[in-house]
Image: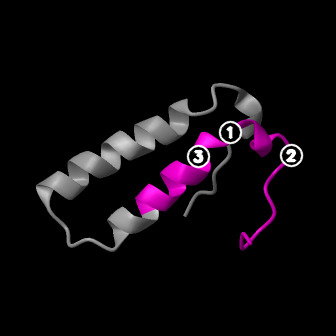
Amino acid sequence: MPNSPRPPGSACCPTRDHLNDAIRDLMNQPASHERTRQWAALLEQWADACPCTCCRWTTAA
């Protein structure tokens, strides 16, 4: 069960669940140039997984 509810329209992006898991796994690896490269690739895939604007949401830290 997710920690927070998904925003309306996020169900159009089922691929992102898989990518989120891959990102979480990557976060557990030690920092390296390869991890940085993989991180950038995963974030790009995550952003491209749902081309509609209804699904692109984030929070700023």
Q: Are marks 3 and 1 in contact (CB under 8 Å)?
A: yes
Name the mark nearer the viewer: 3 or 2. 3
Local SS, label 1: loop
Q: Which class describes the residues within 10 Å of circle 1: few (<14), some (14-19), or many (20+)? A: some
In which quarter of the view is residue 6 placed? bottom right
Q: Amino acid at mark 2?
A: Pro
Write down the residue under mark 2.
Answer: 8
Residue 14: % across, % down = 67, 43
Which residue sits at x=45%, y=66%? 24
Which residue sits at x=36%, y=68%? 27
Q: Amino acid at mark 1?
A: Cys
Pick the residue in front: 33 or 49. 49
Magenta residues? 1-23
| Numbered disc total | 3
Give the quarter of the figure containing the C terminus: bottom right
Sequence-first disc among 3 and 2: 2
Q: Is residue 2 magenta?
A: yes
Q: Is residue 6 above or below residue 53?
A: below
Name the mark nearer the viewer: 2 or 1. 1
Give the quarter of the figure containing the N terminus: bottom right
Write down the residue under mark 1.
Answer: 13
Mark 2 vs mark 1, CA separation in Å: 11 Å
Local SS, label 3: helix
Write down the residue under mark 3.
Answer: 16
Mark 3 vs mark 2, CA separation in Å: 15 Å
Which scheme is used to colour this image of the protein?
A: one colour
Pick the residue in front: 57 or 51. 51
Sequence-first disc among 2 and 1: 2
